[in-house]
Amino acid sequence: MQQELRIGSLRPLMSGAAATAGLAVSISAIPAVAEAQSQPAAAKPAGAAAGDEVVLNRVAVTGEGARSANTNQRTTGIARLNASIKETPKTVNVVPAEVIEQQRATTLEQALRNVPGITLSTGEGNGGQNGSQFRIRGFQARSDVYVDGLRDFGVYSRDTFNTEDVQVFKGPAGDNFGAGNTGGLINQSTKRARLENFTKVDQGVGSGPTYRTTVDTNYQINDTTAIRINGLFHKQNVADRDHVTSDRRGFAVDFGMGLGTETEWHLSYSYLHGDGVPDYGQPMVRGRDGIYLPAAEFGFDPSISYVRSTNQDVTNNHMLGSAIRSELNDWLTVTNDTRLTFYGRDFGGTVTGSCADSATSTCATDFFNRRTSATYALSAGGGLTYKQDGWAIQNVSSAQMEFELGGFKNKAVVGLDVSHQNDERVEGSWPNWANRNRESLFNPRYNYNFSPVYNYAAKRTLDATNVGLFASDRLYLTDQFSVLGGLRLDYFKSEVEQAALQASQSNTDLNPSFGVIWEPTDNLSMYASFSRTHKPVSTDIAALTGLATELPSRTSPLAPEVSDTWEVGVKVDLLNGKLGLTGAFFQVDKDNSYNEVTGLPGGLGEVSTGRRVRGVETGISGQVTDKWSVFANYAYLDGEITSSATAADIGREAPNVPKHNFNLWTTYTLAEEVSAVLPGKLQVGGGIQLASAYWLDTANTQKIPQSFSLDAVVSYQTDKFRVSLNGYNLTDHQNYQSGQGGRAVPSSGRTVMLNIGTTF
């Protein structure tokens, strides 16, 4: 990172918005007004002419040491949002690179265990029909995953090998991100080229077994140009889950030009190949009290899986990106972010379902009586099979301005966000496989010799186009008190074509936001804010399975989901900025909830419901002392169904909302130098992840039990060498990584990971 001090104007330069050349030209008429209102110039060095601006030499600050452990001082990781986390009037959780590295988190799902209030429907780490089905405060966020502020299109298991930090924006964010984002969004900041030379190689070996190799190398070409390359090899048999694998290969490169100058340009490419087996877990079994619990809660072996040899999840994701940032002058910065994505998936999974007695089934009786010869009915006819290919392109162009108008300081952003996505899916069937939907309850068979048949004549093609115009302004009424208003106009159109079916639907919606911010000191920020988001039909086209409630319709067009959030909070820095505290009260209301949850055909979707989630969230991050760091969060969530077509559900607890959520990660440096013979830093650390039980359904009959994980690490590091040993779930508590639709996926028990690395 490089900084430049301008004596002629002490106003901070604005960063982060994107703009095309045409947008920059259209705004270029403003400088005369802005400069006429500029502050009085500071004293000039001897010999400087009146009105001259003296520019000191840039000072390059490189390396990770410049980054604060206090996440309040981190940036949002998104170009068009220039404020720090402390200056942003909403809850934003940051999982910093240091925590990801110390925990040896290998997937996005593992990194997000450090964020309270996130649950999963089919597990990210072990695949599943809809891949990363994250829920934020109980609200679906399966397509609300971003990379450097642009949508991460496609459905796949995301690895962290090219991830710097992870940010989670809580609550609707339609004012900045447009269609979708009804519960919030997840952003991954990637590793970018910088002005230094290093190469890091790490080799990990862990339970399962798991073998993981990563390479991170950065080369400075000249004073303003550098290239950074990251590579990944990951091979894993998932611990404590029979026949479940998760293999990945990856490559990423970032070429940075103009680094440390007024204009920076990053060109990037990344590729991630996944070859694993989707894990739909075990059945939820109805007990004598009528409540469904995971089978393992009744003594069922959690390692038993219903995976078959015909199951696979092969994915390929390519992303080509460009990010330009230019400081045109001391009041205007423009950026332009573009990404082209290609993705493909070859999927086949066995879908487990609930186990209960009925007029046609004795599953629960067989289960509790341990009748080993019993079979039971799988869901979705035994599971889904399909081939998927798609591509998408997105460009965000905007400009940030800082100026005075009428004697008041303003920070304004205007911009244009345009994207298009195309997705093609061909379903497969198994016409020669009789009784594919039946399987042994206690001794499921793995090896089968059947091949699918694909119906290319019934190929489904979905297209989605989104155009958004957005603007916001932060008006400083005084140096301490400001108001922030934002508005985004979104046009979203989705089209479907399948055999004789052709339909399209379009919506035009306004997504507003408003906030008031009081900063009585540099270290303290208090705020109140409101925001709204609309989510039209088919926003998540890469994950859609064909439900009528998800697809555009000519005869029965569905209105968008609408989500509102109110929040009052405080963010404060302590210990000279080394330690940050946050706290907020919030309420999220969502109407017309139509999104599917199970990933299965036949109308197995969420009924149209209204939901409200109220709660409080607190956090702490940073350095308590030079040797002791802490990263912790707590969230209390109270979810309720406020409206439903099923009257009996009104007033019940909203699904996927654990009331109590807590995570802690802390490290302590025992010695900066162990001894003269053994120079190097010795560090110990550990953490807790806790979430209370929650319901999976609106009827409150299917429950995921409380989860608890005690983790620890011990590490030794020199300038050139490092070694660490991580232990996870040390108490061997029975946890569940995800659950939905009558099934739950057991997590691994006690596991370990040994990592050895070198830097040169």
Image (cartoon, rainbow, N blue to C red):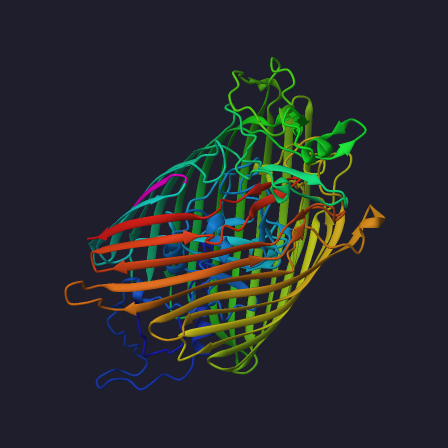
Where does residue 659 sit, x and y in percent of width and height?
A: 65, 60
Q: Looking at this view, is 329 or 364 the one in front?
A: 364
Apparent side of residue 239 relative to residue 122 in the rendered image (left or right): left
Where does residue 399 sit, x and y in percent of width and height?
A: 47, 60
Residue 161, visible in the rendered structure: yes
For the record, the magenta segment spans: 208-214
What residue lies at 56% left-to-right and 26% top-to-bottom? 386
Q: Looking at this view, is 562 or 291 the one in front?
A: 291
Q: Is residue 381 above or below residue 233?
A: above
Is residue 210 shown in magenta? yes
What residue lies at 46% left-to-right and 58% top-to-bottom? 78
Is residue 411 shown in magenta? no
Residue 354, visible in the rendered structure: no
Where does residue 551 sit, x and y in percent of width and height?
A: 68, 36
Where does residue 295 sit, x and y in percent of width and height?
A: 63, 40
Apparent side of residue 301 relative to residue 24 in the rendered image (left or right): right
Question: Which quadrant of the view contains residue 272?
Answer: top left
Q: Residue furthest right?
A: 647
Apparent side of residue 575 relative to residue 675 in the rendered image (left or right): right
Q: Is residue 257 above or below residue 333?
A: above
Q: Residue furthest top?
A: 432
Question: Which quadrant of the view contains residue 327?
Answer: bottom left
Apparent side of residue 572 relative to residue 42 in the rendered image (left or right): right
Q: How many marks?
A: 0
Looking at the magenta stretch, what is its main secondary structure? strand
Q: Is residue 757 above or below residue 286?
A: below
The quarter of the picture where the N terminus appears is bottom left
What residue lies at 55% left-to-right and 39% top-to-bottom? 302
